[in-house]
Image: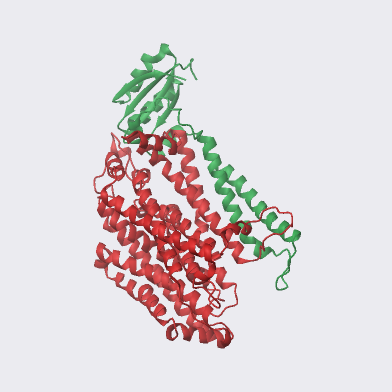
Chain colours: A red, B green
Amino acid sequence: MESAEENNVTYKDVNDIVLKMLEPPTVGWYVLLGLCISGVAIGAFCFSQQLLHGMGMAGIAHPIMWGVYITNFVFWVGIAHSGTLISAVLYLFRAKFRMPIYRLAEAMTVFAVMTAGLFPLIHVGRPWFAYWLMPYPNERALWPNFRSPLLWDVFAVSTYFTVSALFFIVGLVPDIAAARDAAKTKFRKFLYTITSLGWTGGHKNWSHYEAAYLLFAALATPLVVSVHSVVSWDFAVGNVPGWHATIFPPYFVAGAIFSGVAMVVTLIIPLRSIFGLEKLVTKDHFECMSKLIMLTSGIVTYAYVTEFYTAWYSNNLFERYQFWFRPFGEFKAAFWGMTFCNCIAPLSLWWKPLRTNITYLFILSIIINIGMWLERFNIIFTSLSREFIPAAWGGYNFSWVETGITIGAFCWFGMWMTLFLKFFPAVAITEIKMIMPAPMRKPAAGHH
Amino acid sequence: MKGDKDKAVVGVFSYLDDALSAVEFAKGSGYEYKVYSPVPNHHLEHATCDSRSPVRMFTLAGALFGITAGFTLAIMCSLDYPLRVSAKDIVSIPGFVVIGYECTILFGAIATLTGLCHLTRTPNIFRKLGYDPRFSYDKFGVVVSCPSSDVDAVSKGVEDSGAEEVNVENGL
C-alpha cells in the first residue's frame, strides 16, 4: 500500500503538513462557519416554537409518534459508529490505512453523538424533565424501568458518548502538544498549553500512554457492536410488524458502519483537497474505504432480502402485509430510493477505477447517506403507519418545524466540525509517525 | 543512583539509535535519565522500561466496579419500585445485562483515564525539565540528571553518543 513512508515523508513533513491546517482561517472558513451557525439558529428557532406552542407544531401524530426526530436520532447514532470502528477496531487489527483518517472519524463520532443526543430531548416534548430518564434518588422512590429498551438506550448512548470522547481526547493530547510547540499566537499557545495537559512525550509517559490507548481501544470495540444493537432493540423488542425481528441488531450495526464510512469519505475528500493532504491520504486509503463500503452494503442488502424472506416464510398476515406495503404503499418512494442508494449504487465499486475516482466516491458517499436516512425513515414510518388494526392506520406529513430542526442538526454537526478543523489537528500526527520508520543512523537496526 | 542531581544535561538527537546509545551511557554510569520522543517506539520502550505499565490494573478495578454497580443499581431500583411488566420477573437479569455491560465499559474507561493521569502525573503544565519544543517535532532528547561535579563527563558521554547539541540546565 502506498503510504506516507513511500511518499518520502519525514517526521518534520508530517508536523508541517498537519499543523498547516491550523493556520489563520480564510474567508471561506468564516463563510462556512457562518452558514452552519445560521442553520443552527434556524433549528433553534423552530425548536423554540415547539417549546412555546407544544408538540402540535411538529407533524408527529398518531399512529406515527416517532417521526422524523427518531429517524434523525438513529441516523446520527449510525454515523457515529464507523468512527469507533476505524479508530478502535482497526487499531486492534493494526490496519495501517486507518492512520490518516481516524482522527477525523473520531471527531465525527463525538459530534454525531452530540447531534443524535439532541433528538430524544427534542422528541420528549418537555426536555426540562429529561433528567427523569436517569435513575436518581427521589422521595417517591420512583425509579425508571430497567427492563425497557428505552432506558437501555440512555445507558448505551451516554456510555458511548463518554468513552468515544475520552478516546478522542486521549488520542489528541500528544498532537495538541505538537501544536503547542509550534503555536505562533499567544491565544493558541495558551489554548494548547492548557488542552495538552503539559504533555512532553517522556519515555515513561509513552509507555503508560500506549497501554492506556490499547485498553481504550479494547473498551470501545464492544461498543461498536453494542450501541446500535441496543438502538435496534428500541424497535425489535416492540411487537410491531416490520420491527419484531432478531436480525435487527446485526442489520443495524452493518448499516451504521456503512453510513459512517460513507460520511468519512464525504468529509475527508474536500479536506484533502483544501488542506493539501494528498501525501498523507492517498488513493489507496480510498480504495480500502471503498472495500469496507462494498462489504457493509452487501450485508445491508442481505438483511433487506432476509426481512422479506422471513415475512413470507412466517406466513404471518401482518408481517406479509407490511413487506408488501413498503415497496408498493404510500411510502414506496422511500423504499425504492433506499434500495437504489444502499444496494444498487455501491455495486459500481466492484469496478476498481471507480474505487479510486475521488469525484465519483464523493458523489456516491452522499448518495449512500441519503439512502441510509431513507432506510431509517422506511423502518419507522411504514411500520407505524400500518400496525395491526386497519382503523388505526394513518399517514404522516412532517411540518416546517421538523424540517427546520433537521436542517439545524446537520448545521450543528457542521459547526462543530468546522471549529474542530481550525483549532485542533484533524489528522493524527503521532500515529502517522508511528507507521513510519524511526530515523536511524544505521538503518539496518531500524523499523520492523 | 549517583549524587545530588542538581544539574541536567540535555542531549538533542536526530537519530533514535544515537539517543539509545546515550540511554545506555546514562544507565551504565548509574545516572537518572529521561528520554523525550515525538512518538512511542518499541526500541525505546525496551531500552527504558523494565516493567509493563500498571494502567491495566486501574481498568480492571474500574470494570469490576462498573459491573457490580450496574447490576446493583438495576436490581435495587427494581426492588424499591416493583413494577411488573408482562409477567416478567421483578429482578429480570437478562434485561439488566445491558445496564451491567454498559457500566462495565463506562467505569473501565473512566478508571483507565484516571490511571493514565495518575501515572503520567498529568495535568501538569509547569514540569518540563530539559524539554525542548523540537522533541514533539522530529528530534529525540535525552536528559541526564547529575551532580555539578560530573557535568563535564556526562556532557562528553552524551556528545560521544551522537548528540548534535548538548545543553546544561539546573536540575531537580
Q: Nearer the viewer, residue B118 or A385?
A: A385
In the displayed orientation, state which residue is furthest to the front. Answer: A53
Q: Nearer the viewer, residue A218 or A150?
A: A150
Q: Is residue A445 above or below residue B8?
A: below
Viewed as shown, does residue B14 lie left or right of A43? Answer: left
Q: Nearer the viewer, residue B145 or A275?
A: A275
Q: Residue at x 30, y 32 (%)?
A: B14
Position of the C terminus of chain A, as image quadrant, is: top left
Q: Residue at x 55, y 78 (%)?
A: A63
Q: Residue at x 61, y 53 (%)?
A: B103
Q: Residue at x 44, y 19 (%)?
A: B171
Viewed as shown, does residue A30 lie left or right of A399? Answer: left
Q: Nearer the viewer, residue B48 or B86?
A: B86
Total number of numbered discs in the rendering? 0
Q: Please state the horizontal and vertical placement of residue B95, each as a whole percent of the image.
A: 65, 64
Locate residue B152: give its quadrant.
top left
Q: Please state the horizontal and vertical placement of residue B135, each as a whole percent of the image.
A: 35, 32
Locate residue B41: give its quadrant.
top left
Q: Please state the horizontal and vertical placement of residue A94, each as a whole percent of the image.
A: 41, 52
Position of the N terminus of chain A, as image quadrant, is: bottom left
Viewed as shown, does residue B58 lie left or right of A40? Answer: right
**Residue B106 is at least partly visible in this image:** yes
